[in-house]
Amino acid sequence: MAKRVARSSVKRLSTVEKKALILKSAEKVFARQGLKGSRLFEIANEAGLPKANLLYYFESKEDIYRAVCRDILETWLGALGEISADDNPKKAIENYIKSKMDLSFSRPNASKVFALEIIAGAPVIGDYLEKDLKSWVDRQASVFKVWQSRGEMVSISPQHVFFMIWAVTQTYADFNTQITAVLGVKEIGAVDYSSAIDTVTEVILTGLRMK
């Protein structure tokens, strides 16, 4: 487990760095206990900051939570970027799967926070899902349909393709305990990590007839 930043070091951080530290610390706390079960003092302790500092940069615990969720979604969506019909379909999907898998391994708490929010019915970020996320998926779906019209991808629902990619990549964060138990390891190492990416990519590309 990474060590918390020493309070003496925190004092020397810039405003941008302090806000980033607060969000990173909050992500850990929210992943363990969810929004309702978390307390501001727990986030402050994780960050090595006085509770008053949190309320200087954010209005409330809920405000921090919204910022964490928004950062998670923007990071995930940025993993694909804005694809165009001129891009190589196979390479674009490969890169997206690899990026999402990387995020599940490097930032598992983000996936857990998001999963808890969705399971609860998205009470805090429902509007973001219905507007920003839907708009993003619709833009990518329009590119998928061009690829499909050219015979570069099987003609199936682009939206459901994204649901599948999200589900299979995020399971490596959300169900890490189950995966390590079945594999008989304490944590997923480089070999299993590489095997996971190769397997997920092969299955999805084959299903999309993009071999």
Image (cartoon, grey):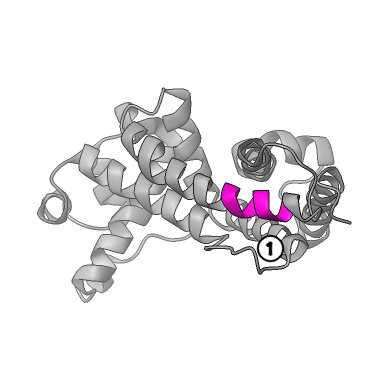
Q: Nearer the viewer, residue 108 or 63?
A: 63
Residue 188 is at least partly visible in this image: no
Q: Quadrant of residue 169?
A: top right
Q: Nearer the viewer, residue 163 or 200?
A: 163
In the shown orientation, is residue 123 left or right of residue 107? left
| Residue 187 locus on image (x, y percent) | 71, 49
| Residue 136 locus on image (x, y percent) | 47, 49
Q: Residues within 10 Å of mark 1 (few under 14, many from 20)?
A: some
Above or below — where is 98 with respect to 186?
Answer: below
Residue 84 is at least partly visible in this image: yes
**Does the magenta portion include 144?**
yes
| Residue 208 locus on image (x, y percent) | 80, 46
Q: Quadrant of residue 39?
A: top left
Above or below — where is 138 with respect to 106?
Answer: above
- Element type at mark 1: helix
Residue on which the image places disc 1: 92
Which residues make up the magenta segment?
Answer: 141-147
| Residue 85 locus on image (x, y percent) | 64, 63
Q: Residue at x 36, y 40 (%)?
A: 131
Most frequent secondary structure within the magenta stretch: helix
Q: Nearer the viewer, residue 39 or 209?
A: 209
Amino acid under disc 1: Ala
